Amino acid sequence: MVRSIGEDRSEQKVIDDIANFGWHCVHIQAEDAQVEYSFTVGLFRTYEHPELIIFGLPSRVSHLILTTAAEAAQSGTPLDLSKPSDELLNGYSCCFAEVAKAEYYEHVGYARWYYEGDHFPLHQIVWPSRSGYFPWHPLATADFKLSQPVIAIGAASGPG
């Protein structure tokens, strides 16, 4: 079950964007120790594709990456989330990892609101440093690890 009516303009925008474009992008600005991040709402409802979240990039970059993934789902040839993809960032491969439902409350409130609970899959897009290291790699810098928290299940042992 999903929401069909919003109680304010921001909620209605989510519903309208999903109706008109198949999905909506939410950007969360950096605040205190929390880094900037973006996530989708509606991919699962519209295309039966997991929702996506990405941390640590400027909102315009994140939006472009999420748009690329959404357009692939819309075209009927979604990205294979079980393996790295070089279709999202020029010159770099991104990994995908499933996010634990325990992380939903803190990170994807609008998605939880829209789906009226946690009944949707969510995958994190994890991108490498300019040196090609993922946050879990031993040679990844501390600053890089802080800029991209990994909330996905089992991502600490991912490729890299």
Image (cartoon, grey):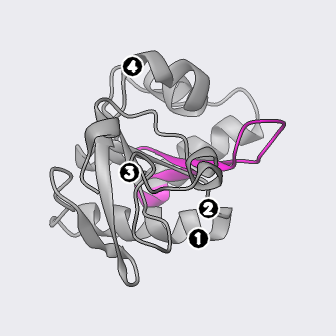
Label 1: which residue? 61
Q: Nearer the viewer, mark 2 or mark 4?
A: 2
Q: Is residue 44 magenta?
A: no
Which residue: 64% across, 31% down? Answer: 6
Label 2: which residue? 57
- Structural distance between the alpha carbons of marks 3 and 4: 24 Å
- Structural distance between the alpha carbons of marks 3 and 2: 19 Å
Which residue: 45% across, 33% down? Answer: 151
The amino acid pointed to by label 1 is Val
x then y, percent, for residue 54: 50, 51
* SS at mark 4 in the image: helix
* Sequence-earlier tag: 1 or 3: 1
Rendered position, 114 above or below 38: above
The amino acid pointed to by label 4 is Lys
* Sequence-earlier tag: 1 or 4: 1
User: Which quarter of the image is occupied by the N terminus?
Assistant: top left
Q: Nearer the viewer, mark 1 or mark 3?
A: 3
- Structural distance between the alpha carbons of marks 2 and 1: 6 Å
x then y, percent, for residue 46: 31, 47
What's the magenta region?
A: 20-42
In the rendering, which numbered label is found on residue 137?
A: 3
Residue extending farthest right:
32
Tag 2 near tag 1, CB within 8 Å: yes
* SS at mark 3 in the image: loop
The amino acid pointed to by label 2 is Leu
Rendered position, 79 above or below 9: below
Rendered position, 116 above or below 133: above
